[in-house]
Amino acid sequence: MENIRINGVEYKVNERCPVCGEPTSIITEEGSVKDVDCLCERVNKAKKRQVYYNKMGGLTIRENSKLENFKCTEEIDYDIKEVVEEFIANFPKILNEKNDEDGKGIMLVGNSGVGKTFACSCIVNAMNEKGYTYLALNLNRYLELLRPNSGEEFTQTQILQAVKDVDLLFIDDLGAENINRENGKRWGISAINDLFDVRINVNKPILITSNLKSREEVETHLRFDESNRTSSRLLGMMRAILRHEGRDKRLANKKFISFLKKMV
C-alpha cells in the first residue's frame, strides 16, 4: 500500500479514482478510513462555486487564454511566459505555504494591448482546470457594485468574503478605475484599500495587471494616507513585477520594442 503526503502529513492510500488516478480515500495514522476529494471531485465542486464568483466578478476569461496559445514575438514575452509557467507549476505551494519568501503574486504593468491580461488569464484557466476557484474583477466593477441604488445583488461584505475565500484573485487594469479625490473625498480609494487588505491578510495568490508604468505610480494611485501601508504590503507580496513597454499587439502591422524591467 503506497503512501501520500497531504498538507505535510503522510497517509496510506486506500482507494484511487479510476478517472484521474488521485486518491479518493486514505488511511490515517489511527487506522481509520477518510474520504478525500480527487481531482475530478475538486473540479466539479469548483465549477459549482465558480458560477457565483463569475457572476460577481463580471470579467470574462477567454477559454483560449492558455499556454499553448502563448505567442512570443518579443524578448519580454519569453520572460513573462517563464514567470507564468513557474507560477502555474508551483501554485499549490504558493497557495498553501503561509511563509512563502518568494511571494504570492504577479503584477504586470505597462502599455495597453501588450498581452498582460492574456498572460494572467492563462494562469486563471490553468488553475480552474485543476479545481481551484478564482475571482476576476475590474475595480470599476467593484466600485459600481458598492454604490447605493446600483441595482446589483452583491454587498461589500459578500464581495470581500469572496476575495478572502477564492484560491486566486485576479484584478485587471488597476489604475483605470474612476476615483473622485476632490475635496478630500476618499470613499473610492478606501474601498479599494479594504479589498487589498483582505487579500493581503489571508496571504493568498493574487494577479494584477495595470497600465501604470512604475512602482511609484502604483503607490501614488493607492495612497490612502501618509503611511501608504496597503500599497507597500501589496507590492511586497509580489514574487514578480514585470513591465512591458511594447506597442499594442492588436496593431498587427506595427513593430514595437519591449523589454523586461523589474521595478525597484
Image (cartoon, rainbow, N blue to C red):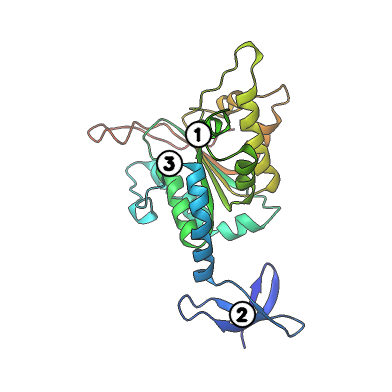
In the rendering, at what x and y percent does residue 83 appear? 49, 49
**Image height of 23 relative to 102, above or below:** below
Quadrant where the C terminus sits is top right
Q: Is residue 232 left or right of residue 81?
A: right
Q: Secondary structure at mark 2?
A: strand
- Residue beneath label 1, please? 141
Q: Is residue 230 left or right of residue 15?
A: right
Q: Give whichever of discs 1 and 2 has the lower sequence position.
A: 2
**Residue 237 visible:** no
Residue located farthest toward the bottom when viewing the structure as drawn:
1
Q: Are marks 3 and 2 in contact (CB under 8 Å)?
A: no
Q: Residue at x 48, y 57 (%)?
A: 128
Disc 3 vs disc 2: which is toward the camera? Answer: 2
Q: Measure the alpha-carbon separation of dots 3 and 1.
A: 16 Å
In the rendering, at what x and y percent does residue 100 appear? 67, 52
Q: Residue at x 54, y 66 (%)?
A: 42
Q: Residue at x 47, y 54 (%)?
A: 85
**Residue 8 visible:** yes
Q: Nearer the viewer, residue 98 or 136?
A: 136
